[in-house]
Amino acid sequence: MEAFLQTLLTMSATAAVVALVVMVLRLPLKKVPRWVTCALWGVVLLRMVLPAGLSLPVSLVPQGVSSGAYVERVLPAVPAPENEGNTVLADPAPQTEATPQTPVQQATVPDTAPEESSAAPRWPAVVTVIWAAGCGVCLLWAALSYWRLRRQVAEAVRVEPGVYETDQIPSPFVCGFFRPRIYLPAGLDVADRTYVLLHERVHLRRWDHRTKVLAWLALSVHWFNPVLWVAYRLFCRDVEAACDQAVIRTFGREDTARYAEALLHLGRRTPLPAVLPLAFGEEDAKHRIRGVLTYKKPAFWLVLVAAAACMVAAVLLLADRNPTEPQLDGHTITRGEMVERLALDAPWADSPVLSTTTALPEDLVEWGVELLDSIDLGPFSPSEAPDPLPDRTVILPVDHSGAVYYLLCPQYGQSSLYFSDGAGNCTQAEIPARQQGFLDDWMLKVEDALNSSAVAQLYACRTPYVGSASDTGAVLEALGFGLMVGDYTMELQTDAEPYGVTLRFQSLPQVNWAENYLTEAGRLALALMDNAGYIAFADGEGAPFLQVNRGDYQDLDIGAEEDFTRLYGAARRNLGPESDAFSSGWCYDPVEYLYFDPRLVEVRQGTEAEVTAAYQGLQFVPETDWFSLHFADGDGHGSAYRFVRDPALLSRPLDSPTYPVITTPDGQTIDLGARQEGEHVFVGAFIEPATGMDTGYRVYVRGEETYLALFRQDVLAYLARVQWTAHAVHPEDWTA
């Protein structure tokens, strides 16, 4: 019912705009025949009965009107029933004062009492009843008018084919839709009779007796629109004027004067718009007499130009602009942002949650809007506005409107689309599961684009000298040390090599992810400061509690932005804490490959360079006694493998050794055993849970260091030193 009303109001608003344009065009068309403007009124009639027009790049009708966006904006929202259809996405965590607020976060959702919502009638039903009643009154008026006329002409006498006389009518008229007849009052003057018949027969040739009935039926549907009532009255005047001009076109001065005299004799005023009949003297006889006496036949070229101009105008009035901008359910959307929420849980932050938004590239906004518009979302149901917005929410504001779409894309779970009209009314629809995959592909592209943007912004801060305090400060600010870990002071050491930077924080960050973040962000800082040898972190005036040295890593000497992109891709997972609700799980990332043979690894599709790149972005994901692999393309690999802490308990021996000394195929020996007295060393294996077969995967834990290896028939395929992320299982847990 709501959809019906929205369509009806959109059609009525569109027809009203077209009618107003035609009213304006009537002014410069006074000198041309009235049949030209009658043709334009036909365009208004079509817009009154057609739900959509031609799809063209240009139109005289504003897109917001023809698309229904304006109507949707002014319509009230359907009240939500109590305990039904509401999705509450509230988060008790307050926002920081510096957090950018989205339109929904600023809006106040009306608090409607459940009793009032359930007891109040739904407005679509009420409005539909009112509309139907008004439509019925208009149709009843037409039926009564016709019934009255039929009674008046019931005893009319046929005087010639199609012409009847009766003494029950005051003025001549045409009546009848399928079998029209001309009715004349008895005793009509012979001269007047001649002109009346000429006039009424022009009506018949032009099918005005049918067009007027159809126009009234359309007006009955749009009875609530005052603009269309005015348009109907002007249409009736133009129809009569067009017939007058058609009759007197060949008249001389004397016949024209007698025709005007006949109008004077038979003219009458109609206080209400008439449905029937097409009476000779109706529709402002005084105005028609003046038009007849002042009429001059226009030049042929003027008629031709006016007809061509009106034809163009008619096409543009019948057209709905085919938008070039992205459209979502008729709304123009040209920009978008993504929300990132970080669970800081830090004493220096005003809130345990930091929320920021990042603008999306225009091409991805267009792609996403087209994708959402193609999805069969089904009806939107009333809902509460999401406040605050969760992580990975895509914000799509509607242009020139306070309305906003919110696409909620949790990393795990079903996505949903919310629409807020800017007035506190919100509706929501779920993304069908069968189309979730397309949305996931788009989200991967969005995240890649945002990562690329972050890389470009960081790389733009690159400086060759750590001695420049302003340039070094710009690098540290871009990496967000102060935002993520708290206020600090910077000390530069440039007296002798190794040159370096020391950051002294006001208080030592006591959070489980801080050291991991400082290590990864420190590596990126060293890569962006060419001659820096180290970056250290201290608590106040004390000695540094962490130092990242360039010499400990082989990938910090970058030559081009592509090198930094690879470095950032490996480090980005540790550059900020993640909300528990959207954590990507426990995982280790490779820090350094001690040995790698692309011919023996599991993923061998593509060139050797492509295989190597896939393993450079590898994630080693253990969960209790299981593990799986995730490669750079985002695909999980294989089944879950079972972790074996004590290979001696297996019913069959492992294919590959579990001791910490590894020999590579080229004869190199790598000893992962204890380097100092009391250092704990642990070696574990992974097997197929169903068959108990050895997978060849080994994990080595030496103190705080963790290594992952793969053996193929006792031949080493790769050995990598891995680093646990903020949410990874600590090596102590593996050795427990």
Image (cartoon, helix red, strand yellow):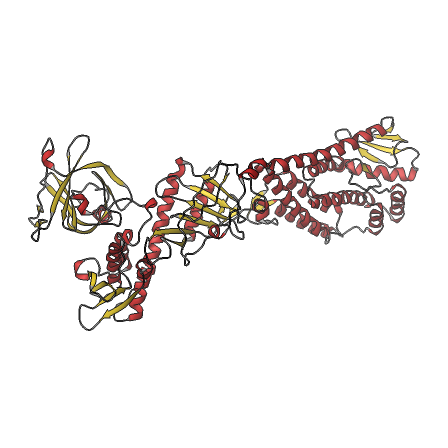
Residue closer to the observer: 513 or 640? 513
* Residue at the (93%, 38%) spot, across then down: 189
Residue 68, position as x, y percentages in the image: 57, 44
Asked whether the viewer can see residue 342, the reply is: yes
* 532 over 139 or under it: above or below: below
**In the visual, does 449 lie left or right of 36?**
left
Residue 119 point in image, percent of width and height: 58, 36
- Choose top left, top right, bottom left or bottom right for residue 733: top left
Q: Quadrant of the N terminus?
A: top right
Give the quadrant of the C terminus: top left
Q: Residue 245 falls in which quadrant of the image?
A: top right
710 and 338: which one is in front? 338
Task: For residue 465, say whether it is visible.
Answer: no
Of all residues, the one furthest to the bottom in this rendering is 495
Left or right: where does residue 120 sit relative to residue 680?
right
Q: Quadrant of residue 204?
A: top right
Question: In this figure, what is the number of numbered marks?
Answer: 0
- Give the x, y percent position of residue 254: 90, 47
Q: Position of residue 530 (x, y in %)?
A: 24, 65
136, 28: nearer the viewer: 136
